[in-house]
Image (cartoon, rainbow, N blue to C red):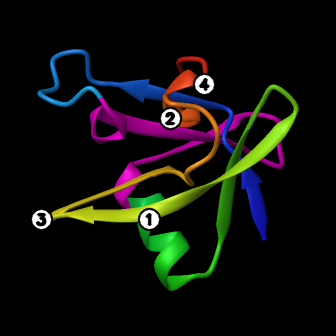
């Protein structure tokens, strides 16, 4: 199943200025709220449960990729025609 990303929370003190600075990813819940997950949990759901997550930006849907950098597991959007990652363009949770 594919789930939209509604918001993200970033760590402003992070050493990273890319998706590795994301601490929380918000997915709309069926009851009307927002379920909040760590990037590691979204990574697991993509890799192990075959779930898909996406962001919508300027009318197009971009899916998230599960990425590993050393021992750090995180997610980012698939490459597209924008230079900045669309995941970081989401509003704050």
Tags 3 and 1 touching, CB below 8 Å: no
Compared across the picture, whether 8 is left or right of 60 comes to left
Q: Mark 1 points at which residue?
A: 66
Query: Mark 2 or mark 4: which comes first in sequence?
Result: 2
In this rendering, position of residue 55 left or right of residue 66: right
Residue occupying the point 78% across, 71% down: 1
Residue of label 3: 70
Q: Which of marks 4 and 3 is nearer the N terminus?
A: 3
Upstream in the sequence, badge 1 or badge 2?
A: 1
Above or below 74: residue 83: above
Q: Tell whether label 2 touches label 1 (CB within 8 Å).
A: no
**Contact check, label 1 and label 4, Cβ < 8 Å:** no
Mark 4 to mark 3: distance in Å? 26 Å
The residue indicated by pointer 2 is 85
Q: Name the residue under label 4.
A: 90
From the viewer's side, name the closer residue of 47 and 26.
Answer: 47
Residue closest to the eye, 48 or 54? 54
Q: Does the magenta stretch include residue 24?
A: yes
Query: Where does the image place residue 38, in percent across and percent down from the top left?
Result: 39, 49
Can you tell which quarter of the image residue 22 is in? top left
Q: Residue at x 35, y 59 (%)?
A: 40
Mark 4 crowd level (few <14, some 14–19, many ≥20, 10 Å Cα): some
Q: Give the range drawn in magenta.
A: 18-40
Q: How far apart are the alpha carbons under marks 2 and 4?
A: 10 Å
Label 1's element? strand
The kind of secondary structure element at disc 3 is loop
């Amino acid at each position: 199943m594919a789930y939209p990303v509604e918001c993200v929370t970033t760590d402003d003190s992070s050493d990273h200025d890319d998706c590795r600075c994301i601490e929380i990813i918000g997915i709309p819940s069926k009851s009307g709220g927002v379920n909040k997950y760590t990037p590691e949990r979204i990574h697991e759901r993509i890799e192990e449960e075959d779930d898909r997550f996406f962001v919508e930006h300027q009318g197009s849907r971009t899916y998230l990729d599960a990425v590993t950098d050393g021992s750090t597991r995180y997610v980012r959007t698939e490459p597209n025609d924008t230079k900045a990652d669309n995941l970081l363009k989401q509003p704050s949770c």
